[in-house]
Amino acid sequence: MVKLIRDTWQLAEPYTPEISQFFYGMLFTLAPATRDFFPINMEVQRGRLVRALVHVVQLVDRPDDLAPFLRQLGRDHRKFGVVPKHYEAVGTALLAALKRHLGDAWTPQVERAWAEAYTIIARAMQEAAAADEYPASWTGTVAEHRRLSWDLALIRVEPEHHIPYRAGQYLSVEVPQRPRLWRYLSPANAPRDDGSLEFHVRAVDGGWVSRAIVSHTQSGDVWRIGPPMGRMAVDRQTGRDVLMVAGGTGVAPLRAILDDLGRWGTNPHVTLFYGGATSDDLYDLEQLRALASTNPWLTVHPVVEHGEGLPGFEHGTLADVVTRHGAWPGHDVLVSGSPAMIRATVSRMLVAGTALDQIRYDPFTID
Ligand SMILES: Cc1cc2nc3c(=O)[nH]c(=O)nc-3n(C[C@H](O)[C@H](O)[C@H](O)COP(=O)(O)OP(=O)(O)OC[C@H]3O[C@@H](n4cnc5c(N)ncnc54)[C@H](O)[C@@H]3O)c2cc1C
Ligand code: HEM
């Protein structure tokens, strides 16, 4: 089933813009209410949903990895207002769009493969959505917006009600400057008594939402926040030491985990490699060093790609530097950063001899 899906997607992928256009046309005809889930200007998101759908459908043969993610994704989709009949409409529109662009390659076997995989995935998402006892989304008010550098801001949000997240998880947010453009962000703090969340946001080139957050967020703005997602965590019971590898704002969820560990007297030893292109990118280094100075179980290694000879810094990409230290046997490994950084680090660690089941990261992103 998966081979048929992958082979046909390879043929169809160059036509993603046309497939997406047809998909949305059909979806909005079959289920007009779904138009309101998407931004007014559809150009902004282009093929986002189609690429996301195809990406997830191709993972149908990895049920162990996929099942927890699908449950979270199903709960998360409630924030749009998605109900079961919309899943049917999305499935029909996706298959019709693929059929139209695949011509003769769309055989009955291919159609069955796509339909079966979509049904399995949509069912898992809907079951989790139906079973969820929490609200579909929360609102929170921005209490602080502080520029840490020209392209980076710290935003503290006070939710109206406690959001049940674990340190290391991420959430999606919708900000008033960019309605209906939800983006994932990772709280940089463990859950607090007052429920407040701190986000570190970097403005990416050409980024619709991140630039608006960094430049235009104001105290008093009301954000919508989706359900917690993600599997990064430290299990203190295993007694295994921990290696953390953080690139840029990828440090945020790891900081939340360190914040959580800081509440306990004894912890596994944690080695954190924190990397960026230059030392200016390591905006959180001083706070991390302060944390390490009072918590002997934590060691922080700053890493820069450019700027050889900086005292106290290791030089190279995170993938280079971490694997220079060996295969990290006996460690649980958490990797967090851009998709490219995660890919490079995980693949180099596997070559260096680290076992895949030692490593955790949140891989399901389409960027
Ligand atoms: C699990 C997870 C957790 C995340 N946590 C955080 C966080 O704590 N803080 C934070 O600032 N961001 C975080 N992100 C990234 C964030 O969700 C957005 O993708 C990012 O802010 C860009 O959104 P945008 O709307 O500005 O860019 P878009 O308009 O969606 O994209 C514009 C362009 O930027 C490129 N782009 C998208 N993301 C990146 C990136 N990360 N680096 C470089 N180029 C990129 C796109 O490919 C595209 O070409 C996280 C992402 C995931 C998947
Ligand atoms: C098997 C079914 C589905 C899967 C696997 C799926 C998967 C995903 C994923 C992974 C994303 C996140 C993309 C990102 O921002 O990184 C997403 C976004 C989204 N999904 Fe779904 N989805 C499914 C069904 C649906 C349905 C039935 C609807 C209702 C119309 C829907 C509406 C949306 C919307 C509005 C977004 C926001 C992105 C955008 O604006 O295009 N999805 N989906």
Image: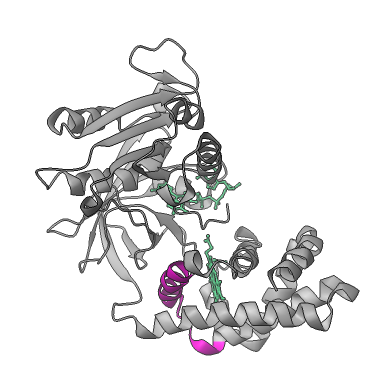
Instruction: Give coordinates of residue 270: x percent, y percent.
Output: 27, 37
Tell me the residue at 35%/52% (across/down).
186
Q: Is residue 305 left or right of residue 117?
A: left
Quick check: is 206 in the magenta stretch?
Answer: no
Residue at x-position 42% and y-position 44%: 336
Residue 229 position, x and y percent, is: 38, 63
Q: Foreground residue, 56 or 2?
A: 2
The quarter of the image holding the N terminus is bottom right
Magenta stretch: dominant secondary structure: helix
Q: Answer above or below: position of 21 versus 115.
A: above
Q: Which residues are magenta?
A: 67-85
User: Could one spot residue 145 in this view of the protein?
Assistant: no
Q: Give the colour scheme of this rendering.
A: one colour
Q: Quadrant of residue 29?
A: bottom right
> x%, y% of residue 356?
48, 49
Q: Nearer the viewer, residue 63 or 76?
A: 63
In the rendered image, which quarter is residue 20 located in? bottom right
Looking at the image, is 112 positioned above or below residue 158? below
Side (left or right) of 334 relative to 65: left
